[in-house]
Amino acid sequence: MEWLDRIPLGPLAVGALLLGLAPFTPEPHLVEKARMLAQGTLRRPIDVFDLFFHLSLPALLLAKVARMALSR
């Protein structure tokens, strides 16, 4: 997991915020896809890919922060 330690926290946080909230209008894709998932309408492959794409950097940030907290 050394590759995770080498990723700088600041740029990762900015990237996670930007990718997690993009597009900013009319609503972020993560909000839209989470609603679709809750309603059971997340069926098209492009929607599933979009959900994973927009969750990739926030999930990586969460993993890095968890690793930092556990290594102390």
Image: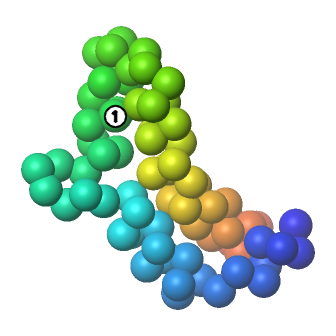
Q: Which residue is mark 1?
A: 33
Colour basis: rainbow
Picture coordinates of residue 59, whole percent (x, y): 58, 55
Residue 69 point in image, percent of width and height: 69, 71
Q: Position of residue 20 (x, y in %)?
A: 39, 58
Left or right: 19 in relation to 45: left
Q: Position of residue 44 (x, y in %)?
A: 43, 20
Q: Nearer the viewer, residue 22 or 38?
A: 22
Could you tell whether 63 is left or right of 70 in the image?
left
The 10 Å Cα crowd at callout 1, few under 14, some 14 to 19, many 20 or more, is: some
Question: Relative to residue 70, is residue 48 depicted above or below?
Answer: above
Which residue is farthest top? 40
Q: Residue at x 30, y 59 (%)?
A: 22
Query: Can residue 62 be seen in this snapshot?
Result: no
Three-letter amino acid code at the position of disc 1: Lys
Residue in the foreground of this view, choosing between 53 and 6: 53
Answer left or right for 52 relative to 44.
right
- From the viewer's perspective, is residue 50 above or below residue 41? below
Choose top left, top right, bottom left or bottom right for residue 46.
Answer: top left
- Front-lying residue, 28 or 2: 28
Helix, strand or loop for disc 1: helix
Q: Is residue 59 visible?
A: yes
What is the quadrant of residue 33 in the picture? top left
Residue at the (11%, 50%) spot, across then down:
26
Q: Quadrant of the N terminus?
A: bottom right
* Quadrant the C terminus occupies: bottom right
Q: Is residue 66 above or below residue 33?
A: below
Q: Residue at 55% of width from left, 77% of height from top? A: 12
Q: Residue at x 41, y 63 (%)?
A: 19
In the picture as drawn, the residue positioned furthest to the left comes out as 26
Instruction: Indicate whether 39 appears above or below 6.
Output: above
